[in-house]
Amino acid sequence: MEKSTRETLQQLAKNIRIDIVEEVAAAKSGHPGGSLSIADVMAYLYGKELRVDPKDPRDPDRDRFVLSKGHCAPALYAALAEKGFFPKEELLTLRKMGSRLQGHPDMTLTPGVDMSAGSLGLGVSAAAGMALAGKIAGKDYRVYTIVGDGESEEGQVWEASMFAAHYKLDNFCLILDWNGLQIDGPIAEVMNSAPHKEKFEAFGFHVISIDGHDFDQIEAAFNEAKTVKGKPTAIVMKTVKGKGVSFMENQVGWHGKAPNEEQKIQALAELNA
Amino acid sequence: MADKIATREAYGQALVDLAETYDYLVLDADLAEATKTVKFKKAYPDRFFDCGIAEGNMMSVAAGIATTGKTVFASSFAMFAAGRAFEQVRNSIGYPHLNVKIGATHAGITVGEDGATHQCNEDLALMRTIPGMTIVNPADAVEAKAAVEAAITHDGPFYLRFGRAAVPTINDKPDYKFELGRGVLLADGKDATVVATGITVSMALEAKEILAAEGISIRVVNIHTIKPIDKEILVAAAKETGAIVTAEEHNIIGGLGSAVAEVLAENCPVPMLRLGMKDCYGHSGSVPELLSAYGITPEGICEKVREVIKRK
């Protein structure tokens, strides 16, 4: 990756992280930890990968993105706002009455949101349905979905995986956010969903394991995924929950808690440093 | 009342018959032979996708397909379509108001020998609570085909309830017209009204004959569209006949009986009785034995009518 491209993506990821902190702080509720862990991949998706146009958010030929771990909507909204799907000021209306930015994504309200999701496991199936529909219609769009590692405890994730492999959906790319934590504690203690790589391989996926905070690895993975024929790809992405805010990193307690004013100021100072 | 045909047979045939007129896909969950989507699968293999025994996934996959502008049918038994996959239907299909048409077969106790685990008497109750869901429970093969076409041309989520057992064809008339959301006045009468849906519609017509011999005159109303329900025809029946009996192959809680009671309680309260499954599970057995055991018969309807008239 060229230095200028990496710097652009790093700046976008930084902006997304700042947006996430400001959104959740303004809402006084929400999910900062898992939003911060996917900030880099969201920057890559909306900064470089996805064929989407903010001026035509319903273009039938666009790539699709489904945030199956919909509670990390602050990261999606930040990416969409940074990309120009709606004004950035709107981010501060997150979770408030009358806002287009619901606690979990609503495709009928928010420009750029391709599927309403948030009840865990459902989004990944919907994404597979979009990929199948693309194949049937002879379109060349691709479908991306981010699934949480905790979310992968839901059986539906594996029903959808079986489906995607069975129908050879090579236009389907599942990104697993392996941040290692869920609400009640470390995944290894609550309900161990690992090993993910072996499971997706057994389900018929081409699997790529990467560091989800390294843009070179993210780019290589997405490029590799596009060369795979006859099977879907799963990118198992090791991440740090709360990445970028020191006191949130790897802390279970920051799954679904908003920073207070003081914490917000500290978080923004770190991100802006 | 000529030949007897199961509404699931009519469903499968309608999917084939309408395939050249309308553009849609059909999904099933390893029950195509039973839901009769197999007819469509054979005729249009490129438009049929089996999702395997994973109904929750099927409903969300259907929703994903529908986001691309394609209408899609998703079929399984009522127990799994409405029961197991309730949350996927609610969140993936209902909440974004997508064009997924749920073809639910084997509803009610006429599943027969498979027994209570597969006899869904709760689907109407579940589906009625989903905002924006349209629900149709056709009475016979003619109405079933019309309902399938109505589902295709309607914008939004749709639940179609079909049965396993063959039922008399009562709508094979040249002037038959299906109007979504409109009840059908099948026979007039003055002493009470029987409001029926699905397999109980032909039973209500039989009950009318039995009661006529006793000097009791009943109106028979077919409510094929459970939601949105035809308030007008119900309120008129209450006003003009003064007593209502509902009859359904469903729990008396949450289905047609409840829907009618809600309308009458708010608009025109009159004596009313509900015939259906009395908040219980079914049992293995032949269809006639089961219908008889749970009182979902023409005679069962007559008993309710005699009782409700006493309360006028």
Image (tube, rainbow, N blue to C red):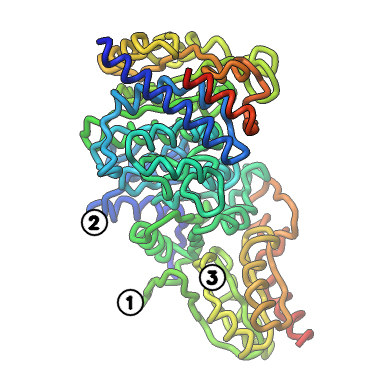
Crowd around label 3: few <14 · some 14–19 · many ≥20 (10 Å): many
Q: Are marks 3 and 2 in contact (CB under 8 Å)?
A: no
Label of residue B174 in the image: 1
- State whether residue B34 appears in this view: no
Mark 3 vs mark 2, CA separation in Å: 28 Å
Crowd around label 1: few <14 · some 14–19 · many ≥20 (10 Å): few
Q: Position of residue B230 (x, y in %)?
A: 52, 75
Label of residue B21 in the image: 2
Give the side of residue A12 with respect to residue B131, left or right: left
Quadrant position of residue A180: top right
Identify the element where label 2 is drawn: loop
Give the side of residue A24 with respect to residue B64, left or right: right
Q: Position of residue B158 (x, y in %)?
A: 45, 56
Q: Mark 3 — residue?
A: B229
Instruction: Name the residue type under label 1.
Output: Pro
Instruction: Name the residue type under label 2.
Output: Thr
| First-in-chain label (1 vs 2) | 2
Mark 1 vs mark 3, CA separation in Å: 25 Å
Circles 1 and 2 on the same chain: yes
- What residue sits 66% from the left and 42% below the top? B117
Q: Nearer the viewer, mark 1 or mark 2?
A: 2
Instruction: Name the residue type under label 3.
Output: Ile
Which quarter of the figure is the N terminus of chain A placed in? top left
| First-in-chain label (3 vs 2) | 2
Q: Position of residue A111 (x, y in %)?
A: 37, 45
What chain does mark 1 sit on?
A: B
Label of residue A67 in the image: none
- What residue sits 55% from the left and 77% below the top? B231
